[in-house]
Image (cartoon, rainbow, N blue to C red):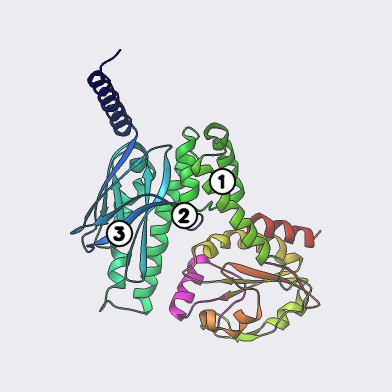
Amino acid sequence: MIPTIYKRSQLLLIAALAICLFAFQQGKDVFDLTGEIKDADNVEISLVWDLYGAAKTMAKDTIRNGHFHLQCPVNEVVNVSLTYHKGREMYSYPVIIEKGKVKFQLMPTGLSQVTGGKYNTWVLGYQRDTAYVRTDKLIWQFRQPGSVRGGDAEWESIQNFMHHFDIRSQYLQKILNNGKDPVAAAMAAVLLELEPDRAKTMVIVNAAAQRLGDSSYVIRQARKMDKAQRELIARRQGAMVGEPYVDFTLPAINGEQLRLGSLVSANKYTLLQFWASWCVPCRAEIPVLKQLYSTYHPKGLEIVSFSMDNSHTNWLKASEKEGMSWPNVSDLLADKSPVIKSYPVNGIPANVIIDQQGKIVASNLLGEELEEKIKTLFR
């Protein structure tokens, strides 16, 4: 018969071994994030997966005197959002959960920088790019009280914003197309929100799924984003098809009054395209429009660009920079324009294709779908 005191000692030893084993496993597979947000105190901060979907909190702490410390087990490498609230405002920054110690710092401009760990260093490396940091500071300076607004200063701010966007986008696209690391590629796809080509990006994501598995957090995240975008596009496309177009007369970029109806009746098809100087996807679409115009304008296609700017300077300079050779109009009322309320514009770029009889035959087609539709119409 085993003495009771021996049983208790044995149980204590087993418990101690279990604690040690747990601690060892935690130390081996733990994400450890220390951070600094100087202007925050007594504020809860969390690591959240799928922030705008079925949000799941991975870890949380309270910011004390600008500092916080977050830990969570690493089941797989996954990109999440570091979030906190100040008043009614929510602030969110990208972080990647991976094994090891990572440091987070929020710069005075609002730019986050994450250092430490393979994927945080690699995938979020654009945050430390010298040109990215410089343009971030210029954008921040423009937004400060007392800074010069309007005119050339506002245009310069738009240029800085677009350059800022391009640096990040080009950096992440290289990771998306690296061909070696499916985890990094899938995370880049999510951070890019599947841009600039959703179909091609999903080919990469689905290839990554063959190695990571369909249950992978990052694969599920990318596929959920793809589904949401497809559903949004489906809701936008087809609006007003079969309905008559709405005519308007507005000043063109050269100051002359232009009536849409005169162009509709004079051409087989008219593409009315809604854009703005500050809209990155809109301006990325312009090379496609140029190609279509070059090919099909001699066959009876007209394009009319409608700018949703409220600044004549921004509209003029963006038009000159993009070199659009087709009619280009605006009332400079942005989203308050009655024209916008007459057409299916729920986000830009947006468009409608109008036939010579004044009937809308397609709406909100972009990229390859727009090219294919125009090609079909002129067969």
| Residue plotted at (77% across, 77% down) | 243
Residue range highlighted in magenta? 307-330
Quick one: label 1, few (<14), some, or many (20+) residues within 10 Å?
A: many
Disc 1 residue type (three-letter): Thr
Which residue is disc 2 drawn over?
A: 55
| Residue plotted at (73% across, 79% down) | 245
| Residue plotted at (74% across, 78% down) | 264
Question: Where's residue 178, x and y in %?
Answer: 47, 37
Quick one: label 2, few (<14), some, or many (20+) residues within 10 Å?
A: few
Q: Is residue 47 above or below residue 348?
A: above
Which residue is disc 1 drawn over?
A: 201
**Residue 197 visible:** no
Question: Where's residue 235, x and y in %?
Answer: 67, 65
- Please identify the quarter of the rendering in which residue 252 is found: bottom right
Residue 44: give its label.
3
In the image, is residue 322 part of the stretch drawn in magenta?
Answer: yes
The answer to whether marks 1 and 3 mark residues whose Cβ atoms lie closer than 8 Å is no
Dot 3 or dot 2, earlier in sequence: 3
Circle 1: element type: helix
